[in-house]
Image (cartoon, rainbow, N blue to C red):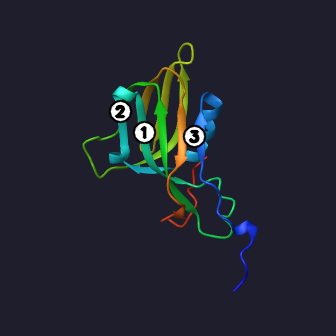
Amino acid sequence: MTDARFEDGREAPLNLGALDGDDLQVISSLAQDAVFPITEMTYARSQRRFALLINRFRWEDQGAGRHAPERVQSVLAFDTVLSVSSQGIDRSDKDLILSLLSISFEEETDGAGHILLTLAGDGAIRLQVEAIEATLKDVTRPYAAPSKSVPEHDD
């Protein structure tokens, strides 16, 4: 048995906010390849909040060389949401698992616009927002990714 080393210590959970397009790109890169059941997507119209409970791949994991790739459950939330629409998603299929590819912002006027969540399989969720107000917060401890591999993308 060996003594614990500082390098083996637990990394802190993410708790990030985004107030502009550059911030949103950071959250997009950290949420890329997140998977979530369609049932973990909610829109609270009266609070103007859209939220997802996602299982995101830990792209920022500095210990990946010491252990298997990890995922962590995180809340991805957007405030100042005026409306939500989707395409290419069968919202009646309660067993549907969605995979998030990217998050982008299309500005209209004075900071208002649309946040687009692009999903694998040609699906998308579009949020009409007054301004960018997004958060990404880890809510569980990391766990070994079921696939035991790093997600790959065709360039």
Q: Earlier in the sequence, mark 2 or mark 3?
A: 3
Q: Position of residue 130 (x, y in %)?
A: 49, 20
Which residue lies at the image location 43% right of the left edge and 43% below the top edge?
52
Does residue 138 sit above or below 5 in this rendering? above
Q: Quadrant of the N terminus?
A: bottom right
Contact (Cβ within 8 Å) of mark 2 with mark 3:
no
The type of residue carrying mark 2 is Ala
Query: How far apart are the two marked residues, 3 and 1, measured between alpha carbons?
Result: 14 Å
Query: How far apart are the two marked residues, 1 and 2, measured between alpha carbons?
Result: 8 Å
Looking at the image, can residue 80 be seen?
Answer: yes
Mark on residue 28?
3
Residue tagged by mark 1?
51
Q: Position of residue 58 (x, y in %)?
A: 59, 55
Q: Secondary structure at mark 3?
A: helix
Contact (Cβ within 8 Å) of mark 1 with mark 2:
yes
Which residue lies at the image location 50% right of the left edge and 57% below the top edge?
140
